[in-house]
Amino acid sequence: MGVMKITDIHAVQPPTPDSPPDWRTHLGQILVEVQTDTGLSGIGVGGGGAASIHVVRTVLRDLLIGREAGEVEMLHHDMHRHTSCYGRKGLVIMAISGVDLALWDLRGKAAGKSVAELLDPNVDLDRAIPTYATVFDEDDAKVALNAGHAAIKLHVERFGDRPDESQIAGLVERVRDVIGADGQLMIDAFARWDIDTTLRIDEAIAGFDVAWLEEPLAPDDYAGYKTLSEQSQIPIAGGEHEYTSAGFKELIDHRLHQVLQPDVNWCGGLTTLIDVYRMAQAAGLRVCPHRGCEPFALPAIAALDLQPLAESPRTWFNCLQNAPKIHEGVIRLSGAPGFGVAVR
Ligand SMILES: [Mg+2]
């Protein structure tokens, strides 16, 4: 592959009027474009809003201009090294994620291959990848299953920080009834419970064949997760708010989760996600990326995942065109070069 020098890097936060009124709006998704002297440019999406845009426009842009765009892993390493004093988790890594993904997009476009093909030359581009939908009650669950989703995730945040286990168990039982014994069911606790609450609820719903219990505790409560991973009957999932390979190495080495859910647009980009797959698979743990139906996570799910299941996408980030869509409950890669998306 010829030399492809980086000439400029731009970042903006597209308006998303329908995003939830919380940090996901204020520090929302950013669009990153890496331009090169060949005329090719790559598109990535990161997180962190204006704060992250500042990091891209200053530190990362200065660091990368004039560098060879094809050396993605080296550039990724250098971005971490130059920001590690002030950004080992959170906003800075969300910024790096957007640049990393734009570099992978460029790598694919330069090779005339989709990112999935870069990850596995033998990947089946037509494969129907099963998806799951998040639901709130048994009626939603029925609609989601009828739409063809392979699994459903029950959202229970509305029951508060210390819910009564019988309330949650009642809901889980009603949902299990409507989806039948074979339907896959997960629970998301939104990082609001404590150890005792989690173990009470775990005990109350363990008989309903729950595939995973997601983020019961705050993301940095490693000691709590260690206790849960040893005592919970239901597999514990988490990691959408973890960052970098070093961060995931902690989760994996200490087996704090049975299911790891890196967010490719936040955790450090595809370079990090590949690392997470490698480390988790070596440890015999499952990876199920956060918002897996979105165009930046789907190639890794198609090419690297042993048990592919893609989470339904965010609906409010709609500035990209040609992103794969769920059809009859499954999703397929676009097959176009890079991540296959363009800015609307
Ligand atoms: Mg979640």
Image (spheres, rainbow, N blue to C red):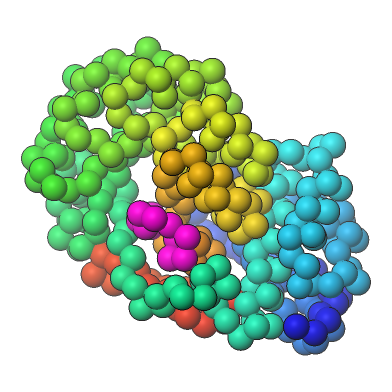
Q: Is residue 67 visible?
A: yes
Quarter containing the C terminus = bottom right
Q: In which quarter of the image is residue 56?
A: bottom right
Where does residue 65 sit, x and y in percent of width and height? 89, 68
Quarter containing the N terminus = bottom right
Vertical order, 14 against 39 (above or below): above
Residue sitting at x 71%, y 68%: 103
**In terms of depth relative to the viewer, which is nearer, 4 or 306?**
306
Residue sitting at x 21%, y 41%: 137
**In terms of depth relative to the viewer, which is nearer, 166 or 20?**
166
Determine the residue located farthest toward the front in the rendered image.
282
Position of residue 144 in the picture relative to residue 1 (left or right): left
Where does residue 193 sit, x and y in percent of width and height? 41, 22
Q: Can residue 13 be seen in this view?
A: no
Q: Give the range drawn in magenta.
A: 301-312
Residue sitting at x 85%, y 77%: 5
Position of residue 149 in the picture relative to residue 105 (left or right): left
Position of residue 159 in the picture relative to residue 298 (left or right): left
Determine the residue located farthest toward the top in the rendered image.
196
- Residue 304 forms part of the magenta stretch: yes
Residue sitting at x 20%, y 63%: 147
Position of residue 328 in the picture relative to residue 110 (left or right): left
Where does residue 2 sit, x and y in percent of width and height? 80, 84
Vertical order, 108 against 147 (above or below): below
**In terms of depth relative to the viewer, which is nearer, 41 or 51?**
41
- Residue 89 forms part of the magenta stretch: no
Q: Quadrant of residue 105?
A: bottom right
Number of on-image labels: 0
